[in-house]
Every structure is written in C-alpha cells, then in structure tokens.
C-alpha cells in the first residue's frame, strides 16, 4: 500500500500486515470505519442488482419503442391498404350503378318498342291472376297481352265484332286531256276500288276498275282517257272486318285536246315475202291508220289516183297490211302511210321487196 505525505511529497509503502498493525494502534479507526465497511459490503449486491435492473429497464424500453414504431408503420400500411380497398369498392359501386342505369335505359327502350309493335296483337280481356307481376315484366310475354291487361282490366269480355262500314268522304276529281285523278277519304283503313265508264248508270260488273290496298287517303289515276269526254264513276271501300261502303255515282269531263299538228312517227318497218304475197308491218308513236302503196314501176307515185294500195282505217299503234295475188319472182316498190286522229299524215320512203320464184 502506498501513502503520500502532502508536505514533503514523499511516499511510504506499507504491507497489509503493516496496515492492520497500524489500524490496531488507531482506536478511532476501529470505531469509525467498521460500520462503514459492514454497510458497504451489505449494500454492494443491491447496488449491483439495481444497476443491472436499470440497464434492463432501459433495454426493455428501447425494445418497446422499436416495437411501437414497427407497429405504427404496420398500422400506416394497414391504413393505406384500407384506403385502397375503400377506393376500389367505391369504384366498383360506381360501375355497378352505371351498369344498372344502362340496363334500365335499355329495358325502357325495349318496353316502348315492344308495346308499339305488339300493342294490338291480343284482344282485350286476356287477364291473368299474375296481373301486377306482368305489368313489371312486359318483355317476358307477348306485349299485346300486357297492353290489354295493363289498363286495369276494365273488360273481361272480347269486344263486339265490327259491323260498321267505313264512311267515304271528300271526293275530288281533277280531269285532264287524256287522264283524270280521283281522290277521297275513309274514316278507317279500307281497300278502295274505283269503277268508271262512259255510260250511266254505271254497271260495276262490266266497268273498268282500279283497286288499291288498305288506306285512309285514297288516290287513283285513270288513264288513258279520251279528250272532251264525260266519264261516270263510283268507288267502294272495304274495311279490315269486311264491311263495304259504296259511294254515289258522280261524273267528270276530260279537257279538250290542243290542236295536233304533229304527224305520227313510223318505226320498225318489216317485210315478209312469199311467192305471191308480201306482208308489211310497222309501228307508230300514236294511234293512226294504216295504208300501203305498191307498184312494179319506180319511182312509186303515192299521190296518183291510179296507184294501187291496201289500207285499214282503224287507229292503232301496231300496223300490218298483207298484199296477195302478186306475180312470182317480181320486184315490188312499196310506201307505208299512217294518219293520226287529227289528220296528220306520215309516209315512209320508198322501199322494195321481191316475191319468190317458183
């Protein structure tokens, strides 16, 4: 053991045995230090344990803080997941609402189309016990049934058969030169027939007629007619139930034709030759007479009174004249002529044909 004296700075060394000897000579030391040493030895394990406990408490507290921070981070992640799930659910609900709205729109359009197409398909009175359910499920049934039962089922018996004939009204005529337009109305859809002729009373069994399909407004054109001529007419109307109404007889007069100064046009001239016959055919653009000049000399003079000819005074558009008892193997010179109702005349140029030899 080392001991230092402050005044001299000298140091003296003692052994433990010397220290004990020294302490034994100092009575105050025994009295003062003995309790202190005993107390120190007694409390040293407690201090050591307290220090260890304090160190353990500090470590536990750190671990708890670390665990708390990790839990907070996990909670934040959970909150983020919850927010993301909530957004997905909201978007899913929005899509579902839009789909429902579109389906409702399609069903509404389908109901309107169904009712429009089949509203009159089934007669009134076809009512069932599932009335209220059918009202909300129209597209599962023929829609005429829904139409008829959705009015509250006012009637459970079929309607009375239709025995009333349509009413004909508003007869109008617009005569022209060679045709006339007739128009009239019916109070329901009906098939119209118009009879017309130049005699009165009009005989519907033999008169000319024009018919049209079911309608409320009827318009017909009569052609061809003669100019400056009085015609008599009447019409009948038959509805979908077979009821028929007939109008009174009425008349109209076609207009006068303006002066005709244009001769007919001759086309499609054709010749068929035999041993003693020649047949000539042609067409005109309006009704006209038929006349054929012929001779064995040329040029053919159609104006000469001595020139032979064959004719037909009927006004037609298709013409045919036959020449017979001709010489065989002979050339004949020909001219065709047609005259319309106004006296306008058209002639062809001279053409020829040779009869066949024996």
Image: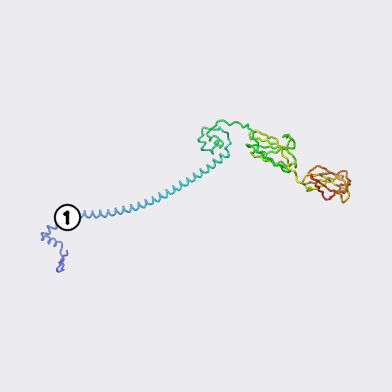
Q: Give percent across and percent down for residue 116.
A: 57, 40
Q: Is residue 48 above or below residue 219?
A: below
Q: Is residue 6 above or below residue 258?
A: below
In this view of the protein, which residue sits in the foreground, 16 or 179?
Answer: 179
Q: Is residue 348 above or below residue 133?
A: below
Does residue 326 appear left or right of residue 174 in this picture? right
Q: In the rendered image, which quarter is residue 341 located in?
A: top right
Label 1's element? helix
Residue farthest toward the bottom in the current orientation of the protein:
8
Does residue 212 appear left or right of residue 331 in this picture? left
Residue plotted at (17% across, 55% down): 39
In this view of the protein, which residue sits in the foreground, 128 or 56?
Answer: 128
- Give the number of callouts: 1
Does residue 165 appear left or right of residue 337 in this picture? left
Q: Give percent across and percent down for residue 101.
A: 49, 44
Image quarter where the N terminus lies is bottom left
Q: How is the image coloured?
A: rainbow
Q: Give percent across and percent down for residue 271.
A: 82, 47
> Can residue 213 be spotted in the picture?
no
Q: Residues within 10 Å of mark 1 (few under 14, many from 20)?
A: few
Does residue 357 appear left or right of residue 14 in this picture? right
The residue indicated by pointer 1 is: 39
Q: Give percent across and percent down for residue 318.
A: 79, 44
> Can residue 39 be spotted in the picture?
yes
In this view of the protein, which residue sits in the foreground, 294 or 13?
Answer: 294
Q: In the rendered image, which quarter is residue 313 located in?
A: top right
């Amino acid at each position: 053991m080392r001991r230092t004296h402050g005044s001299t700075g000298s140091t003296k060394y003692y052994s433990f045995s010397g220290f004990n000897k020294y302490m034994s000579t100092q009575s105050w030391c025994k009295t003062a230090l003995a309790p202190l040493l005993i107390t120190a030895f007694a409390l040293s394990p407690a201090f050591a344990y307290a220090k260890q406990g304090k160190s353990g408490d500090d470590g536990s507290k750190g671990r708890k803080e670390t665990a708390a921070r990790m839990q907070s981070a996990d909670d934040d992640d959970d909150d983020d997941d919850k927010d993301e799930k909530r957004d997905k659910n909201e978007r899913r609900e929005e899509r579902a609402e839009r789909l429902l709205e579109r389906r409702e729109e399609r069903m509404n359009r389908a109901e309107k189309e169904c009712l429009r197409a089949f509203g009159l398909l089934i007669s009134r009175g076809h009512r069932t016990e599932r009335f209220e359910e059918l009202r909300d499920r129209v597209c599962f049934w023929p829609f005429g049934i829904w139409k008829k039962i959705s009015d509250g089922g006012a009637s459970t018996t079929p309607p009375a058969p239709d025995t009333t004939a349509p009413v004909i009204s508003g007869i109008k005529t617009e005569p022209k030169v060679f045709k006339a337009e007739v128009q009239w109305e019916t109070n329901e859809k009906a098939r119209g027939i118009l009879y017309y002729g130049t005699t009165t009373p009009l005989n519907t069994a033999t008169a000319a007629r024009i018919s049209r399909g079911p309608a409320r407004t009827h318009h017909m054109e009569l052609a061809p007619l003669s100019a400056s001529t009085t015609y008599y007419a009447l019409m009948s109307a038959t509805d979908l139930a077979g009821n028929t109404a007939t109008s009174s007889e009425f008349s109209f007069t076609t207009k006068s034709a303006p002066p005709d100064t244009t001769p007919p046009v001759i086309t499609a001239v054709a010749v068929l030759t035999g041993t003693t016959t020649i047949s000539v055919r042609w067409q005109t653009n309006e009704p006209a007479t038929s006349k054929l000049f012929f001779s064995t000399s040329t040029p053919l003079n159609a104006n000469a009174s001595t020139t032979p000819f064959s004719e037909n005074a009927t006004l037609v558009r298709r013409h045919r004249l036959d020449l017979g008892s001709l010489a065989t193997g002979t050339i004949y010179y020909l001219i065709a002529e047609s005259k319309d109702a106004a006296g306008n005349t058209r002639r062809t140029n001279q053409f020829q044909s040779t009869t066949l030899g024996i």
